[in-house]
Amino acid sequence: MWISIAILAVILGGSLVVDRFWCRYLCPLGGVFAILSRFSLVRIRRSPQVCTDCTMCDKTCPVGIEPSKAKPFVSTDCIGCMDCVAACPVKGALRVEGPVLLGFPVLKETERASASPRERVSAGSKDAS
């Protein structure tokens, strides 16, 4: 009985000191997600050339990740809510990319540029009208 009370006290005390203490350090499902996120098909990527370091994305992250400091991919602790991408005031600073294999992009930068002709077509149609 005392052991269970002590465990409960540690968990509650840890939760008062560290945000999401149970999820970050003790939850077995969180550990599985951390391993599986390495094999995610998509990943949020930060473009340091475009990012203004305003940290608006950091404030909206429910997990406490700092996407403004990502080099270049956001942490594997990311739950994929996309709140940081929606909160970013600079277009293109944070973007969702894929596929990703073991934390590394499958497409090279030149292939990625040629794989998105839709952006060039829509930009060209704006100039033509």
Image (tube, rainbow, N blue to C red):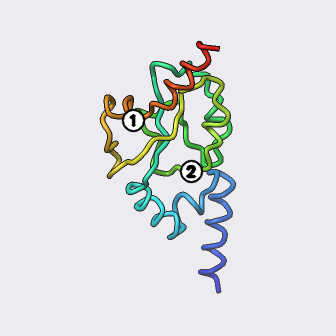
Give the SS element for disc 2.
loop
- Where residue 114 appears, as percent x and y from the top left, is 37, 30
Name the residue located 62 percent from the left edge and 38 percent from the top edge.
Answer: 84
Q: Residues within 10 Å of mark 1 (few under 14, many from 20)?
A: few
Which mark is first along the chain, 2 or 1? 2
Viewer-proximal residue among 8 and 71: 71
Name the residue located 60 percent from the left edge and 73 percent from the top edge.
Answer: 7
- Where residue 78 appears, as percent x and y from the top left, is 53, 49
List the single residue furthest toward the front.
Answer: 129
> Tag on residue 52?
none
Of the 4 image quadrants, the one containing the N terminus is bottom right
- Where residue 3 appears, as percent x and y from the top left, is 59, 80
As measured in the structure, the alpha-carbon distance from the residue carrying label 1 to the one carrying label 2 is 23 Å
- The residue labelled by disc 1 is 115
The quadrant in which residue 107 appears is top left
The quadrant in which residue 4 appears is bottom right
The correct choice, above or below, for 111 with respect to 83 in the image is above
The correct choice, above or below, for 51 with respect to 35 in the image is above
- Left or right position of 75 against 1: left
Of the 4 image quadrants, the one containing the C terminus is top right
Viewer-proximal residue among 75 and 82: 82
> Do the residues bearing badges 1 and 2 touch, measured as CB atoms within 8 Å?
no
- The residue labelled by disc 2 is 80
- Left or right position of 15 against 95: right
